[in-house]
Amino acid sequence: MAVRTGGASSCGGGRHDRGGGVPVDRDRMSWPPRVAPRLLSGLLGVVAGTLWPTPAEAHLVTTGLGPIYDGISHLLLSPEDLVPVLAIASLAGLNGAPAGRRVLFTLTVAWLAGGLAGYFTGGFVRPAGLPAVSFLVIGGLTAADRRLSSAVLGVLALAVGLVHGWINGAAIADAGREALSLVGIVTTVFLLLALGSGFVVSRRAAWARLVARIAGSWVAAIGLLMLGWSMRGVS
């Protein structure tokens, strides 16, 4: 008596592989490519909304431990300052140790100089899309992973330090706080730059550079969303 051997059979819309494996639902296999872009867009929107500066962020964080600790906590709790510092640390690290050292000292000194200028001139006025520009430029350069000269990185660090430092100094003056808060801010900037750029420089593997570039692309994407909202007058 002949025994019939069946070919591929289906059950519940699935299919068997030729080796008699477990049925696989084609719909389940195809859902990530369709849903992932929507999830990514939604997540970027949530993160950008969280980072979008509000009027309350113009005031210095109060810890009750003194002006220096207030400055430290202000930087660590202010994404519009913290994220560009981490991003430029990654960018400097991707360009090697000499670039990292130049950015380290240039950005720190520029942040302090801008902070003192903002503190003594007073009058807290921040252009609507200014934080977004920092996100977009630094994040875009990090994602591109192009070799930049130390001079170019120095100019970028100088601009970022002066602008963000002036905003911090003006906010401190507007809140009626002591200028010593700038010491806490600048010290934190220095430490984050040293640790961040040093970490990136020490990682020679290709995956480490890829992680830094992906992080830079996220920063740039968030900056682009923030810039678009500022141009539409959404706060």
Image (spheres, rainbow, N blue to C red):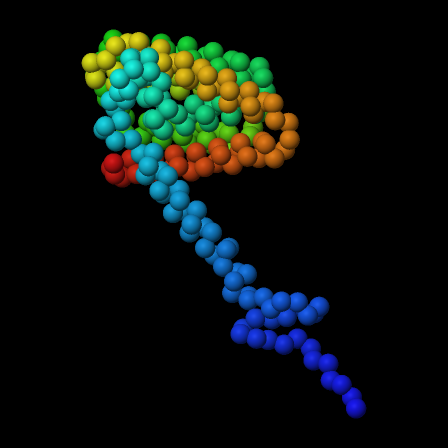
On screen, residue 224 versus residue 233, left or right, reads: right
On screen, residue 205 versus residue 64, left or right, reads: right
Q: Residue at x 57, y 75 (%)?
A: 11
Residue 162 visible here: no
The C terminus, quarter of image: top left
Residue 177 visible here: yes
43 vs 72, nearest the viewer: 72
21 vs 8, nearest the viewer: 21
Extreme front residue here?
65
The N terminus, quarter of image: bottom right
Extreme right residue here?
1
Q: Quadrant of residue 175?
A: top left
On screen, residue 233 versus residue 131, left or right, reads: left
Q: Residue at x 35, y 42 (%)?
A: 46
On screen, residue 194 versus residue 97, left or right, reads: left
164 vs 8, nearest the viewer: 8
Is 212 placed above or below 24 here? above
Q: Residue at x 73, y 81 (%)?
A: 5
Is 44 placed above or below 127 here? below
The number of callouts visible is 0
Is 216 placed above or below 109 here? below
Q: Position of residue 110 (x, y in %)?
A: 40, 12
Q: Position of residue 43 (x, y in %)?
A: 40, 44
Q: Residue at x 50, y 23 (%)?
A: 196
Q: Quadrant of residue 56?
A: top left
Is 145 placed above or below 23 here? above
Q: Position of residue 174 (x, y in %)?
A: 21, 17
Q: Position of residue 214 (x, y in %)?
A: 51, 36
